[in-house]
Image (cartoon, rainbow, N blue to C red):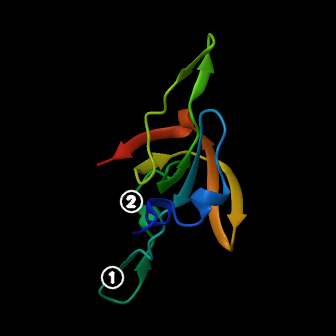
Amino acid sequence: MGDTKKKEGGKTAQKVKPLGDRVLVRELKSGGEKSISGIIIPETVSEDRGAKKGEVVAVGPGKHEDGKIIPMSVKVGDKVLFQWGDKLTIDGEEYEMISESGILAVIK
């Protein structure tokens, strides 16, 4: 029987558990498109430079407000559009720890 945590977020989800309303995101990077003449056009040319695409790897329990926990609106495995975060390197892979408010949208 497989371990669902490994499938969803790899070993990182087991090593790092965000607190509060924080989310651990792995940025999705692509090589860009290649033009007919062989020039590689980065994906950032056609998108907003302030936003990044990523996959949610781990999620905190939620925001504490008036003694209650407000649950998170994202879950492990969601593809999201997010702003900046604190960069972390775990087992040689780069991640960003961001607040839920730094997530702009869930990509469907």
- Label 2, secondary structure: give it: loop
- Amino acid bearing label 1: Ser
Foreground residue, 33 or 70?
70
Q: Secondary structure at mark 1?
A: loop
Q: How far from the left and from the top, in percent, is residue 73?
A: 43, 34
Q: In the rendered view, tell whether residue 106 sits above or below residue 67.
A: below
* Residue pointed to by mark 1: 35
Amino acid type, callout 2: Ser
Instruction: Sort mark 2 into few (<14), some (14-19) or many (20+) by Cα contacts within 10 Å.
Output: few
Q: Which residue is mark 2?
A: 46
Image quarter (top left, top right, bottom left or bottom right) of the N terminus: bottom left
**Separation of marks 2 and 1 at Cα, in angstroms:** 14 Å
Q: Position of residue 37 (x, y in %)?
A: 34, 89
Mark 2 or mark 1: whose residue is earlier in sequence = 1
Foreground of the two, 5 or 70: 5
| Residue 62 percent location from the top left of the image | 56, 30
Q: Residues within 10 Å of mark 1 (few under 14, many from 20)?
A: few
Residue drawn 64% across the image and 33% down it: 20
Residue at position x 71%, y 59% from top? 88
The quadrant holding residue 25 is: bottom right
| Left-right relation of 38 to 67 | left
Left or right of 68, for residue 106 = left
Give the quarter of the image for residue 35.
Answer: bottom left
Quarter of the image where one finds residue 41: bottom left
> Where's residue 96, x and y in %?
63, 54
